Image (cartoon, helix red, strand yellow):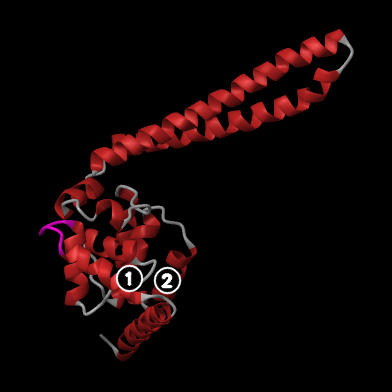
Amino acid sequence: MNKLQTLARKIIKSTFHLSVCAIEKFHDIDVYDQKCRKLEELPEGTLGKDVAKCLKKNNLRLVPHYESHDLKHVLLDYKMTPVDEIRLQAFMIGNRNYTIPSFAIFIFGAFLLPDLWATFYTDFKNGRKAKPIKNWTIEEFASCPTSTLRQIVFNYSTKQKTEINMKSLIKFGAYTAIILGAFGMMFCLPFLFSSNLTDLVGAGFAFIGGAIIASSGLLTLSNITSIRKQVRTSIV
């Protein structure tokens, strides 16, 4: 490793430490220390227990709003080092975690570490193939076995991906139905107060049709939400 590469890693490490110190200064850390102690009480092999052990090993503590971030470090087996932090962000962007912090951290790290671009690209591809986990929280999965969760994430089948794509398509159709139905109802509403019988009848049927279309969209969204809850429950 040359001097420039060493300097780049030191800059990243110092930046992260400065960010953590700033966050800790404006939050009640005692609450998160207590939360970490509860994680330590979980059985061996659970994700929560492994997160607590990892933090202790690296002389770190839970930081406000970063609990789920620590979860991903342990779940995906990325070390808590400057380089692995950038690798984690590459994975998460590939995993469709399109957030400003993820892009900012990744771009910052990739700019300073051009020697690892091939590694970052591999992490990105791994994230693209894995099960989406951007919404996973430590509250939901702390008691689950880490090994089982890793299998779920990394053995994500093509069938599951197709189901997710179909859900997205159905969801888009549901929103479209709601918008079109509501627009049709609003367009017909003035004609319902017309003294002309033809306008009244025509608008009435169109208004009912719009209501049916909008209602079908709402029912579809409700069903998608119900299915999502059932899937999450089966994982836990």
Q: Nearer the viewer, mark 2 or mark 1?
A: 1
Secondary-structure class at tag 1: helix
Q: Which residue is drawn at 29% across and 61% down?
A: 72
Q: Which residue is drawn at 77% across and 22% down?
A: 188
Q: Which mark is residue 105?
A: 2
Q: Which residue is drawn at 30% across and 87% down?
A: 6
Q: In this rendering, would 158 be left or right of 194?
A: left
Secondary-structure class at tag 2: helix
Classify 162 as above or below 93.
above
- Report the amino acid beneath label 2: Ile
| Residue 110 shows in the view | yes
Do the numbered discs 2 and 1 sit on residues whose CB atoms are within 8 Å? Answer: no
Q: Please identify the dominant SS of the magenta region.
A: loop
User: Within the image, what quadrant is residue 201 found in?
Assistant: top right
Q: In this rendering, would 96 be left or right of 206?
A: left
According to the image, label 1 marks what residue?
31
Q: Which of 98 and 56 is in front in this view?
A: 56
Quadrant that contains the C terminus: top left
Residue 217 position within the rendered picture, expressed as x and y whole percent measured from the top left: 54, 28
Q: Give the range drawn in magenta.
A: 41-46
| Residue 120 shows in the view | no
Q: In this rendering, would 172 be left or right of 165?
A: right
Q: Which residue is drawn at 15% across and 59% down?
A: 42
- Report the amino acid beneath label 1: Val
Q: How far apart are marks 2 and 1 (CA)?
A: 27 Å
Quadrant that contains the N terminus: bottom left
